[in-house]
Amino acid sequence: MGTSRSDRVHDVVVVGAGPAGLAAAGRAAALGADVALVDGAAVPGGQYWRQPADDALAGSVASLHHGLARYRRLVERVRGIEAAGGWFPRHQVWTVTREEGTFVVLAITGTGAEEREVGIRGRRLVLAPGAYDRQVPFPGWDLPGVMTAGGVQALLKGHAVTAGRRVVVAGTGPFLLPVAAGLAESGATVAGVHEAASPLAWGRHIGAVVRNVAKLGEGAGYVRTLARHRVPVRTRSVVVAAHGEQVLERLTVARLAADGSVLPGSRTTVAADVLAVGWGFTPQLELPMALGCATRVDVDGSLVCTVDDQQRSSVEGVFVAGEACGIGGADLAVVEGEIAGAAAAGTPLTDRRLLRRRLALRRFAAAMHAAHPVPTGWIDRLTEDTVVCRCEEVTVGRLRSALPLGADDARSAKLLARPGMGWCQGRVCGYAVSCVMSAWTGVPPSPVSIAARSVASPLRLGTVAATEDPSSAAES
Amino acid sequence: MAEPGSDVVVVGAGIIGAACAFFGARAGLSITVLDRGSVGGGTTSRCEGNILVSDKGPGPELDLALASRSLWLDLAAEHGAERYELEEKGGLVVATSEAGLSSLRSFAAGQGTGGVIAEPVASERLRDHEPNLAAGLPGGAFYPQDMQVQPVLAAASLLAAARDLGARVVTGEEVTGALRGADGRITAVRTARTTYPTAAVVNAAGTWGAVVGERLGGTVPVLPRRGFILVTEPLPRVVRHKVYSADYVDNVASGDAGLETSAVVEGTRGGTVLIGASRERVGFDETLSVEVLRRLAAQAVRLFPFLAQVRLMRSYRGFRPYCPDHLPVIGSDRRVPGLLHACGHEGAGIGLAPATGRLVADLLTGAPPQLDPAAFDPMRFVLEDA
């Protein structure tokens, strides 16, 4: 344990080395800024271009990646940062603070007794924290074998591991296709893709779609891969329950009516040892919120950072890029990163094409959210003993018992019945609890109360204490 | 459109408002509780739920605390301890220096005259109480009367019990002012949405008591004193009692505006360990202070070295409502007939709530108070005209 504080003050500190952070760091460095790039992983790429820590695996997962050439270009552009001592891999940021007019990014590195805190100083910040899978509970979802689509993808890209032998991919959104295609290409049997949305849903947003033909091409490629592996793709289809003695054995799937309810007589059973399920993504806002950045509710119901056309947040010197500004995918994240990196380096981009590209991609994202909502019927399919919060083992019945005590939103439910109090701090259950409470009480959900977390990543108390200045702890 | 009238409107659905509502309803009054937020969503949700006598010297606050403690036990007997998650866990105060030990001993001796049970604990016996304490601490005192409740659950359960007695609780309703009759008496409480006819109003708005008091026509000098609490990952029961360093008592009573910290460590039913306590006067500044977290962590690790390896999962901060003399304001506001205050309990609101609620009920019904309210008189801060 211990700490290291460098006196070096970078012009720009970029947190997150996914598509947005890589683009921001590279662009700022190219414009002459002294840049630090901080990420929890060993290799840049983020969730989208997640790379194995072990180089030997890199070749075997290369085919899973979309836009790998672009990834390599972005990585090439940050080489100079590494050479100048500004690349901080395996550094998990737990908070950001201010000191003497600079920002200090406080990160944890090393494991076990080697854990220590590193303070990385910067005059300006680019926060590109990304997002995590949005989950909704259903009967049996707490069985081992039920995983997030993002988690299954991370195993595949990061460790060349297929999560199961017979996998069902379900939920909603374009992300399901690459997950299913990657599994099929890696040797798993994909027993089916169950997309809750209607295939017609995109039709109303044709304008947004035609401006992003490349994205359609990407999707069509995955569809071809799935067809080659004879993977059935069902739309308006949803997993309503998971079954198994100790681990996942079977799933009940059903067809959805337009109102999100299950069509009578449409339930069938599918054998599977893994379910990869995802209902879109939730931005990680701990760091922007710790700095007081203003937020808004996006079209998909997620809380996101408010930024201007230069990706400036409401806080002077803090720029935000990528999924934290609204879930929109890697292409949008890269564009936002380029803009944020340039602005943070003090040379705002005047390239109108990039700004127009961002607008087009945001329209595409809005169309995607409209086409892939979380169908509301899931709340009606919960049973009293369905677990809502897995960390604290809070069931629907337990949550309901907080109602007569006055619980009327996610926060008061947490205080009275403990959902969100455990290890994940509500990252998994926060969205679901706020939806359920809102459905029960009629009070609109308040995403702010479930997004703020004072400690972005757990760390040892000994590490927190180690940097204490002994002279200030005047304990007599 | 006005709402149905009631004898009393209680402003604030925190622990103090809940206790006022419960004891008022039990005394036969019709009660309406209004809160701009949720039940127990203010300072009640930002504390540890302490019911302490160990940190109080003889005087009116200790009298209130002892009366309150026995009322908490009555409530637990009447409704079930589970409704409040009441635990008679006891407190262990640990000196960190020889000088600290001798001042703790004399403080404890004084407390004894006020009705507090304090058992001296020699250095070598400290670990009988807390096996995981650091070695070599000079000694301490065990306070078997210290207890704890789950504060939000306690407020919610008191309000539920009040509702069973006919009280009405309206959340999401912010009080904006009062209507007064020709004689100056309060006749109704105004909110952004409607009015609530009433003969009396109790300002139980805690840290926001000054603002609510002003809106109702009688301000009180309640100010925020910020505190942070660290929450660890869930563990098996590793800290049995409330354990704190003897410096805590000095910090509670201190008038210093700067940052003061002293280790206060305790386990919870959920398995997490809570680490406090910091005090600083920075208004309603909500930003995380890493410096405070570092000091609290370091002090806790000094008391319990194993905590160095335990992970910090989150922290939270709250604003204690304090008055210049560190005593709450409980009683009638003679500037505004019909207005009573019950706020400013600083860091002791959970512990002091039932006796406060009963005292307010006595004042409302005209029953002889079971405790002398003179020291808590809201008028003590007001230069009254003859």
Image (cartoon, rainbow, N blue to C red):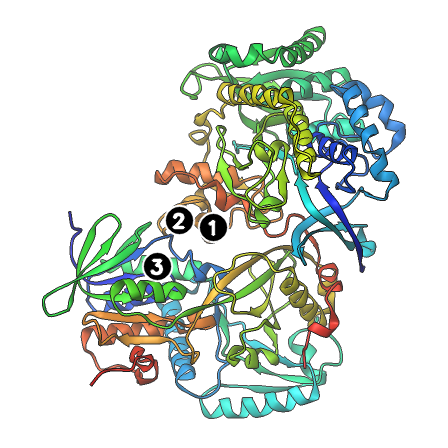
Q: Is residue A335 visible?
A: yes
What percent of the width, then of the height, locates residue A474? 68, 77
Q: Label 1, label 2: how many angstroms apart (C-alpha)?
A: 9 Å
Circles 1 and 2 on the same chain: yes
Quadrant housing residue A360: top right
Is A275 rendered above or below residue B312?
Answer: above
Query: What residue would you read off at disc 3?
Result: B13
- Any mark on residue A417, and which? 1
| Picture residue at 73% right of the left edge, 46% below the top | A92
Name the one closer to the observer, B21 or B35: B35
Q: Label 2, label 3: how many angstroms apart (C-alpha)?
A: 12 Å
Residue furthest right in the image = A56
Check disc 1 and give the amino acid type. Answer: Ala
Q: Secondary structure at mark 3?
A: loop
What percent of the width, then of the height, locates residue A296? 49, 37
Check disc 3 and give the amino acid type. Answer: Ala
